[in-house]
Amino acid sequence: MNNSVENRFFAIVCGALLVFVAPLFVLFLFLSSERADKEIRDHISVLLVANAQALAKPLWDLDEDSVTQISATVVSQGAIVKVEVRDQSGQLDVSQSTIPRSFDGKLVQVSRAIIYNTVDGPKNLGSISVYYPALGLFSGLKQEEVVFISIFIFAVLTVFGTALIGNRFFVIQPLMRLTAAIEATRQLGSRHHVDWQSNDEMGRLAHSFNEMQTKLESEEKELKFAHRRATDIYNLTPAMLFSLDEEDRITAVSDYWLLATAYNRAAVIGRNFADLVTPTTRDKFVKRRRAESGLTVTVKFVCLDGRTMDVLIMESEAGAGAHDRLSLSVMTDVTELKASEDRNHRQAITDHLTGLLNRQGFEAVLDNKIAAADAAGQELACLFVDLDRFKWINDNMGHAAGDMALVELVERLKAHLAPSDEAARLGGDEFAILLPAKDAEKRARMMCEQIASIFETPFAPDMHLSASVGIAIYPHHAATAAELLQKSDMAMYAKKRDGKNGAQLFDNAMLDRARSRAEIEANIEAGLVDNWFEAFLQPIVNLNGRGIAGFEALMRLNHPQKGLMPPAEIISVAEETAKIVRVGNVIMEKAIANLAKISRISGMQDTYLAINFSPLQFEPALPARLAAFVGRHGIRPERIVVEITEAVLMHDNPEIRMIVTELRRFGCRIALDDFGTGYSSLSYLNRFPVDIIKIDQSFTRAINDGDDDVRQKSRMLIEGITTLSHKMNCTVIAEGVETEEECRTLHQMGLDYGQGYLFHRPQHAATLIEELMASQSAVARAS
């Protein structure tokens, strides 16, 4: 009851009296005391004035008896309890006191000087001092004030008592009834009402409480009904429902859950749900439930009869507090779905044609194989296998024949694989093989020999294949799965460049070549963006008179720091990265612009421009683009020569044939470059509209070879090519002419034009134009 409303009200009233009434009462006593003290001081002041005058003559005469008599008169006046009279010389010191011995209070002193008027003027003879007791707070009260204070205290106590009685009757009593109703409701469970009727706040509170009790009683009935209905739904729903508490114990299960799992309710209520999950998935369930508030997990559930189900558990929080966690979960049998997913996963990581792993599956297995090799203290060899000439089989024998060859290859390969080995088809004709071993390099070389033996037997009549194999060893060459696959791939491409059909072990020099290639690729891209590419020109001269007939445009990359870079590597990388089209367009436009400038020089109006085209440049937009360039600079189409190699014509691509024909119809001439170095099929001259034949510089150098046999055969070949070309109305140009002897011999053989360092080196267009103009000026001066 220390914290009851009544005690608090009592404390509030007492506090109010102390805060407001008590200070006023103290202030009143203080003012009364001040007033009484002032009255005493005024009375003493008057008394001192009169007695100081009366004492002046006796003190002048040192009449001690008179002084003593006057002092006795003063000390008997009112509140004065002590008088002291002293003269200045110290001869007279009179003291009168009525202070009782038991007095221990404080005395207040009031003094005044005694002045005597002589013929010489006023003189200070001494002083008189009187003492009176200091007044307390109650000392200055008058009788009427005491009566007033008594009435005031009585009134305050009356108000205080009335407030307590009123609070007791109008507040405490209804609150007690309200409390009793609440306690009865809590203890008995029934909704009790408050028996109180009034029109004040307490009455409204009692009325509201009674209405609340009535409403709650109604809602409890509805809640019980809803609970019964929810329980029926929980048990009758055709789903495996269950609930867990904060310690993962089963608190409820539905009838359908019992039917599906064969358990009975009494046996599972209170059991930990994780105990009903297989050990392989138990940790997964426990960790996920601790980490997530809304659980979604797939585990293997063990039924009472020993069956194992793959079940998907989806949990939602049914209630949560500081120390409890209730959940509602649904458990769905996904055994068939899981089996289907496993089948789909196997299909997703398996090559449908060969049954080997595909790239996705291989990359996943590669990480596991590296981990297993580390655990076993072994090495891991990765063989990257790429078939040679497989595209030719698809193009000429059909994709069905190619697929059949791949299936046969895999069947032969499997016979050489150990159980710990892993093979995959990465795509097309690319395969990868993983070989774990103590000495992985030795095992890899043995496997390469076995792979080579696979290809000794044809896969079908006239279907001969070979393979280029790249080898990388973990951990010697690579530290990660991606790096291992990348370096075996690099080794395979190195073997491809070295002639195919064999195996190549990775070495760091390949990285240098790869970095060099990446640097060249970056330079190509920067050159396209920053305009580093230039079209150098090399004149083509008439062997009879050496007049300039035309110019060949040659690509050069002028790096701002490195200067001119070797064009062969740039062209090779540009073709591999398909950037040759962009580079070719830049060179073509700049070369045509340079021809337009040269055409302004006297005698150069009919010279032609030969432009080399990579096979990748023969796209449908090429004729329109070339037409736009020559139209922009006012160049006649017949002054443009399109130089192509045998690689463009070899596959007899209908699209390339159409583009070449369209260029020829537009008016451009066609030149067959490097004739004699490839297959050199004369059928090209018949099937394609060729105007110019360019004999490769290797034949040009051989016509004066020190070996008579080589020299004689080279001359016969060049003479034969020249005769056939002239018969087909083709002009013949010799490339790589470097000596006067070569020039005379070629002219005697009947060749039309020559190109080489003997006549002119490839030059920047501006430099070439300066030389041509200087030459023209020299001729003019000579004439």
Image: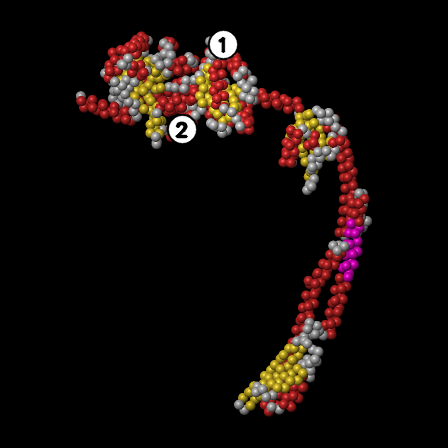
Say which label, 1 or 2, has the lower sequence index: 1
Q: Is residue 397 left or right of residue 334?
A: left
Local SS, label 2:
helix
| The quadrant where residue 76 appears | bottom right
Residue sitting at x 69%, y 31%: 275
Look at the picture and state if 420 lies above or below 275: above
Cα distance between the residues tagged 1 and 2: 43 Å
Q: Looking at the picture, which amino acid does disc 1 mark? A: Ala
Q: Check residue 460 in the rendering and tell me which mark sits there, or answer none.
A: 1
* Front one among 100 and 383: 383
Q: Is residue 515 left or right of residue 269?
A: left
Q: Where residue 696 sits: x, y (%)?
A: 32, 15
Q: Check residue 519 in the rendering and tell me which mark sits there, or answer none.
A: 2
Residue sitting at x 77%, y 46%: 209
Local SS, label 1:
loop
Q: Is residue 590 visible?
A: no
* Front one among 692 and 96: 96
Q: Where residue 303 sits: x, y (%)?
A: 71, 26
Q: Where residue 2 sits: x, y (%)?
A: 75, 55
